[in-house]
Amino acid sequence: MSSIIEELQSTVKKLLEDGTVGYVIGWGATRFPDRTTPVFITRPEDAHKLVWNHYCVNGTAKYALDDRYPEKKIGIIIRGCDSRAVNRMIQDNQLKRENLYLIGIPCDGKENPVCEGCQHKNPLVYDVLIGTPVEEKINPDRFKEVAEFEKLSQDEKYEYWAKQYDKCIHCYACRNVCPACNCKECYADQYRVGWQGKQNNRNSNQVYGLTRAFHVGDRCIECGECERVCPMGLPIMRQTKKMLKDINDLFGDYECGLNDSRPHVLGEFDLQDRDEFM
Amino acid sequence: MSVKRDENWEPQILAFCCNWCTYTGADLAGLNRMKYPENVRVVRVPCSSRVNPQFILRAFQKGCDGVLVCGCHPGDCHYATGNYFTRRRFMLMQRLLEYNGIDPKRFQARWISGSEAAKFRDTVTRVSQEIKELGPNKKFQEEWYSEGGAGNE
């Protein structure tokens, strides 16, 4: 592990010294041993501040959206999920690949429950790879939780979600951290249109949850950032995974953020789609 | 709660109808003096793919008991491909709503062409009957409506 950190720090130092990148987004230490924070390294002598350990949980890719027209390339240290986030935003025409310098680093799972089901531990796209690739494994239980939940009765499902959404505090952290939520202006912020009720009651929370699930459902990369940042612990992934499960059932195997250029499911159609509305 | 379930309860159903086929079909049903339930409110949209899934949520919020989206048959879209997007979108929306506890009968989509006045009548009659059996919808409803709406003020 320590050799990976040294390799990472020396690579970043070299990139900053020769001016390939303007700055590098990575993880830095905090005063707690089991917490890290995203850091922006701008000077070569600061490269030693980068860390790489079991607690590097934050997604790094979305910060690039704050700098859409950089003077130099943006260096991002990416794990498997961050590389899919980068692919997501490139496919959504939010980022340009030539503006990014991707420092890939294979990840063996972090302090985050979603990592247990991870199917892409190695970065899918990178300019330089630190360390050696780790073994990938297919997760047979990808939709197990959703399938179990579907067995409940309609009223039980409604009660479950209503209780969950009663906890929501409209902080929009899930939207802010989501790589698929990359609209310049979110519908929830459009106060004059009034799609989103601003009251904190069950109804407007439900509408927010469902609308967000539908907005990102066919583009979700399953990084689990929404659930990680939710201060109230809502099972947000359960909604988007339901969308992905249906897409897999109806339109064939589907995973987002991979290197193929397949458009997202609701942005294309097939004449041979199943027809239930005759 | 002042709302009581009585024998005379009639569901409120919102039907989004494509201007180029279903709306014309509904018009034809009227011209032919066909009788269909009065509890269907028709909203004319330029294409069934104009219907944003948020419209459906909003309809449930504002006290509708059922929502119907009607468009041209696949292949007949006035804009060539609009209803193919509708088909994908609402197959997923129906499942997501069911996952959140809404009966799939409360939100349906149908293809009805401009000449199918009888199909429009039959569809609307059947949907209305199904929703009448399900009873009033309280799920996803705004508080003001579930407490009785304008009738309480």
Image: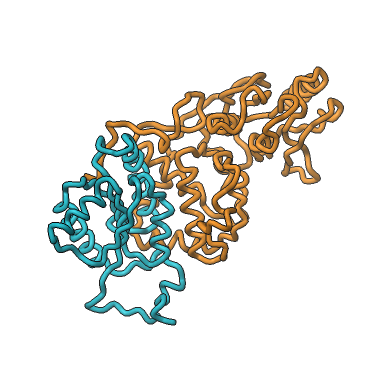
Chain colours: A orange, B cyan
Q: Is residue A41 above or below residue B21?
A: above
Instruction: Kindly tell me whether residue A108 is visible in this rendering.
Output: no
* Camera-nearest residue between A168 and A195: A195
Residue B99 image position (x, y, % from top left): 38, 53
Left of B130 or right of it: where is A23? right
Instruction: Kindly tell me whether residue B14 is visible in this rendering.
Output: yes
| Residue at x-position 20% and y-position 64% | B129
* Camera-nearest residue between A170 and A121: A170
Q: How many marks?
A: 0
Left of B104 or right of it: where is A104? right
| Residue at x-position 23% and y-position 77% | B8
Q: Is residue A200 above or below residue A244?
A: below
Q: Is residue A154 above or below residue B8?
A: above
* Camera-nearest residue between A94 and A208: A94
| Residue at x-position 30% and y-position 62% | B41
Residue A43 image position (x, y, % from top left): 84, 28
Left of A266 or right of it: where is A223? right
Q: Quadrant of the C terminus of chain A?
A: top left
Left of B105 or right of it: where is B122? left
Q: Quadrant of the N terminus of chain A?
A: top right
Residue B90 image position (x, y, % from top left): 34, 46
